[in-house]
């Protein structure tokens, strides 16, 4: 890439990133997994010109092992653990040499390298991990191209964040014959979804239906989590219902109409037991919970904070939890699988009433939901029975075994990379009908907001 081209390249990349970040923050785009063909097209064409000018006449080289490309990694949550799940599954299937990992680091979060917890979760060694450190986006683009040229992967698995413009620009066949975008950020407008030749892996049936409605090549792969075995602790061990939830603070926004502190108070007034929060909470949030409980006449010692566990499944057992409440209004996809693996009854939050599919085989059996505090209290009241809890536990564990076990994940992923298709959704038509009207309106809004954006 010539130096005189740098400012234009930098501008294209920056505009693409800022457009998506602006949409993430704008009202009307919440929960909208829209593809952005105008920006994707500009990025792809720029990358194509770059590749042709840089490697013109170069002879093809042998393709080596898999390469995983991510924007940022985490010590918690499902995003980074999913990379490890892919690595484990493909290794068990005997899928070639050891994989490599490239972190584009577009926001500079990993200037000091990856900590030990993150590295362990990826299952990829330090020696095969490269973090891009260069300052500008155009410099990082060159570094990413250098790494892909050096590694010559046969397959790339793309775990980039929705606003990362580097990966879509270089998602070309010249750098890897098979390119698969793992669509983990499936509730926000995302770059890369409409790149030519890119295959998309969606991780739940609703996300897959949204992709299909946009004419995208999508395969459905349900998440997994390690199998901890049978539940070793009884329900209602202390005679009172013990509830739990898990998630980082951003999953419980302060301005949501059902605040976390108030909801915990409602739970404890009904159960008179304990509520266990697993995951990081800032001191101010903890103080607000304590103050709210005191104001509502609840003993603050009934709220238990566990900042971190190595396994959510085992953490629920260790704290004798009887019922798991999904984080709200943003739930955790992998967390739900770990809860199912533990055989803990699952209670989710429904933000708004909408059409549902009765007896949906691709959701957790026995799953319950609340949409307001009155309904929450009613559901909790119905669960103060060891018999009811045991029945719910058996149902949710059965779903884990049939849909989310490592063996099922491994076989499905193997079929997808062989081009044989992923999970078959028996309700594909009904799901698409439910989604079509709202998605069409949102995609039109997204397209209008992008006119005149990326290529100027």
Image: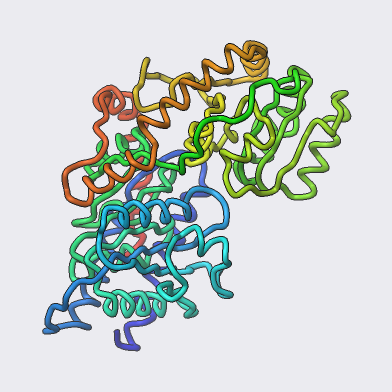
Which color mode does the image show?
A: rainbow
Q: Quadrant of residue 99?
A: bottom left
**Drawn side of residue 147 relative to residue 347, left or right:** left
**Drawn side of residue 183 relative to residue 62, left or right:** right
Position of residue 314 relative to residue 10, above or below, is above
Q: Position of residue 298 (x, y in %)?
A: 85, 25
Q: Quadrant of the N terminus?
A: bottom left
Observer-nearest residue: 173 or 18?
173
Q: Position of residue 217 (x, y in %)?
A: 22, 45
Observer-nearest residue: 428 or 408?
408
For the image, the number of numbered tags is 0
Q: Position of residue 53 (x, y in %)?
A: 20, 82
Q: Position of residue 214 (x, y in %)?
A: 26, 41
Q: Quadrant of the C terminus?
A: bottom left
Position of residue 357 relative to residue 149, above or below, is above
Which residue in the rendered view is the most extreme toward the bottom?
Answer: 3
Position of residue 363 relative to residue 178, above or below, is above
Position of residue 198 relative to residue 260, above or below, is below
**Drawn side of residue 294 relative to residue 238, left or right:** right
Residue at the spot 30% in from the left edge and 34% down from the top edge: 209
Residue at the spot 18% in from the left edge and 71% down from the top edge: 174
Observer-nearest residue: 410 or 40?
410
Residue at the spot 67% in from the left edge and 27% down from the top edge: 243
Residue at the spot 51% in from the left edge and 46% down from the top edge: 26
Q: Quadrant of residue 432?
A: top left
């Amino acid at each position: 890439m010539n130096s005189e081209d740098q400012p234009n390249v930098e501008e294209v990349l920056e505009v693409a990133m800022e457009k998506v970040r602006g949409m993430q923050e704008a009202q009307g785009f919440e929960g909208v997994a829209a593809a952005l063909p105008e920006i994707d097209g500009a990025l792809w064409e720029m990358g194509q010109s770059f590749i042709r000018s840089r490697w013109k006449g170069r002879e093809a080289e042998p393709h080596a092992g898999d390469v995983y490309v991510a924007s940022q990694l985490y010590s918690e949550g499902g995003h980074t653990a999913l990379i490890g799940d892919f690595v484990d599954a493909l290794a068990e299937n005997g899928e070639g040499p050891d994989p490599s990992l490239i972190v584009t680091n577009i926001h500079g979060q990993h200037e000091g390298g990856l900590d030990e917890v993150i590295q362990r979760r990826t299952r990829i060694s330090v020696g095969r991990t490269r973090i891009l450190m260069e300052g500008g986006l155009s410099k990082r683009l060159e570094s990413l191209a250098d790494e892909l040229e050096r590694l010559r992967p046969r397959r790339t698995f793309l775990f980039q964040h929705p606003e990362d413009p580097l990966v879509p620009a270089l998602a070309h066949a010249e750098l890897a014959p098979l390119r698969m975008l793992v669509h983990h950020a499936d509730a926000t407008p995302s770059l890369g979804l409409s790149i030519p030749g890119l295959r998309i892996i969606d991780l739940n049936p609703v996300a897959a239906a949204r992709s299909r409605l946009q004419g995208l090549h999508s395969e459905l792969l349900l998440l997994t989590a390690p199998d901890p075995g049978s539940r070793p602790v009884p329900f209602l061990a202390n005679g009172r219902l013990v509830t739990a939830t898990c998630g980082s603070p951003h999953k419980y926004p302060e301005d949501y109409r059902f605040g976390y502190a108030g909801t915990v108070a409602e739970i404890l007034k009904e159960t008179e037991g304990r509520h266990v929060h697993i995951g990081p909470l800032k001191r101010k949030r903890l103080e607000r919970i304590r103050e709210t409980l005191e104001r509502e006449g609840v003993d603050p010692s009934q709220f238990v904070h566990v900042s971190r566990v190595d396994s959510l499944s085992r953490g629920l057992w260790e704290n004798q939890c009887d019922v798991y409440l999904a984080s709200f209004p943003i739930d955790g996809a992998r967390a739900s699988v770990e809860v199912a693996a533990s055989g803990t009854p699952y209670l989710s939050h429904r933000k708004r009433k909408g059409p549902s599919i009765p007896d949906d085989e691709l959701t957790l059996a026995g799953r319950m939901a609340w949409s307001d505090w009155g309904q929450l209290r009613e559901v909790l009241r119905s669960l103060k029975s060891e018999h009811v809890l045991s029945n719910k536990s058996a149902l949710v564990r059965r779903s884990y075994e049939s849909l989310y076990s490592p063996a099922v994940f491994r076989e499905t992923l193997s079929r997808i990379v062989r081009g044989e298709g992923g999970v078959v959704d028996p309700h594909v038509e009904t799901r698409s009908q439910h989604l079509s009207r709202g998605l069409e309106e949102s995609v039109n809004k997204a397209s209008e907001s992008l006119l005149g954006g990326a290529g100027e």
